[in-house]
Image: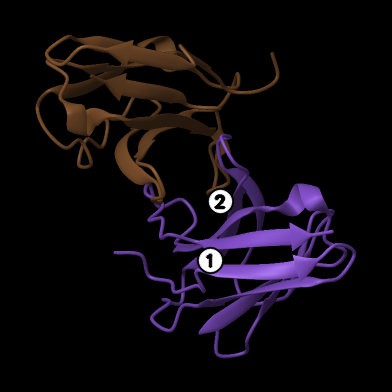
């Protein structure tokens, strides 16, 4: 079973920030939080990962709570091309398997 | 090419036939994964290869499923005596060695068993 819970779906207006939450209350000390997204009919795409500090890259920002039991992926200026299913996964880095849940289906609306 | 390629992109087969799905990962990616994804579902882990180590086959759903990785590069997933429940998108991903689990996925093969 996936070790994360995410809302099934979310909507966001184009140009606004999309904030996608993820609960991972049973995360272990050596487990990272990874985010991937899957655009319709494509393979998943890596977005970002973090351990305990907030992270930012060219795609998104990742905010992890101090107790590490939840996190938020932020797309600062969502575009229509960001419409996808977003998966939050916890994993001990080099651990061989990623356990995928159902993710959050984000719809960015014009 | 620079990305992960998979072939065929689509495969329609009759129940009972064998199929082979191919994955060509990014050069230098020592780890290779196979997943399958049924409609509207998340990814289901099938098998993992890492270098010369014995593969982790713990996700293979039955002995009809097998996979090989030759020369540490191209991988083939074989499904024997296909069943209708095998219909899914089969995804391959590669990863560089090292600590983090950033996987690079191919576009998948959509398998339909009639």
- Taking the image as shown, residue B98 lies to the left or right of residue A25, namely right
10 Å neighbourhood of mark 1: few (<14), some, or many (≥20)?
many
Label 2 SS: loop
Residue drawn at (69%, 69%) of the image: A11
Residue drawn at (55%, 66%) of the image: A33
Asked whether residue B74 is in view, the answer is: yes
Query: In the image, residue A85 lies at what x, y percent?
Result: 57, 54
Which image quadrant: the C terminus of chain B? top left
| Residue A99 sits in quarter | bottom left
Chain A painted colour: purple
Instruction: Check contact, mark 2 vs mark 1: CB within 8 A.
Output: yes
Chain B painted colour: brown
Instruction: Give the residue at mark 1.
Output: A32
Q: CA distance from mark 2 to mark 1?
A: 9 Å
10 Å neighbourhood of mark 2: few (<14), some, or many (≥20)?
some
Query: In the image, residue B8 lies at what x, y percent?
Result: 45, 11
Asked whether residue A74 is in view, the answer is: no
Query: In the image, residue B10 lies at what x, y percent?
Result: 44, 16
* Foreground pick, A50 / A13: A13
- The color scheme shown is by chain
Determine whether A48 is above or below B61 in the image: below
Instruction: Using the image, tell me which numbered label, if any, was put on residue B100.
Output: 2
Label 1 SS: strand
* Foreground pick, A14 / A60: A14
Residue drawn at (45%, 13%) of the image: B74
Query: In the image, residue B83 lies at what x, y percent?
Result: 15, 25
């Amino acid at each position: 079973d996936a070790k994360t819970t995410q809302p099934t779906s979310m909507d966001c207006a184009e140009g606004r920030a999309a904030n996608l939450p993820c609960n991972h209350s049973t995360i272990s000390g050596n487990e990272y939080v990874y985010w991937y997204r899957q655009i319709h009919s494509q393979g998943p795409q890596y977005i970002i990962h973090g351990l305990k500090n907030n992270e930012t890259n060219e795609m998104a920002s990742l905010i992890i709570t101090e107790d590490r039991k939840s996190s938020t992926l932020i797309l600062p200026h969502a575009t229509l091309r960001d419409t996808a299913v977003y998966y939050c996964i916890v994993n001990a880095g080099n651990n061989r398997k990623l356990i995928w849940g159902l993710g959050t289906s984000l719809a960015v609306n014009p | 090419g620079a990305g992960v390629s998979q072939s065929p992109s689509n495969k329609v087969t009759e129940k009972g036939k064998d199929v082979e799905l191919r994955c060509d990962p990014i050069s230098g990616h020592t780890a290779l994964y196979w997943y399958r994804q049924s409609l509207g579902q998340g990814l289901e882990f099938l098998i993992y290869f890492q270098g010369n180590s014995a593969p982790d086959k713990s996700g293979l759903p039955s002995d009809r499923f097998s996979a090989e990785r030759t020369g540490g590069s191209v991988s083939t997933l074989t499904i024997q005596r296909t069943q209708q429940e095998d219909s899914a998108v089969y995804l391959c991903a590669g990863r560089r060695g090292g600590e983090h689990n950033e996987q690079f996925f191919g576009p998948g093969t959509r398998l339909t068993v009639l």
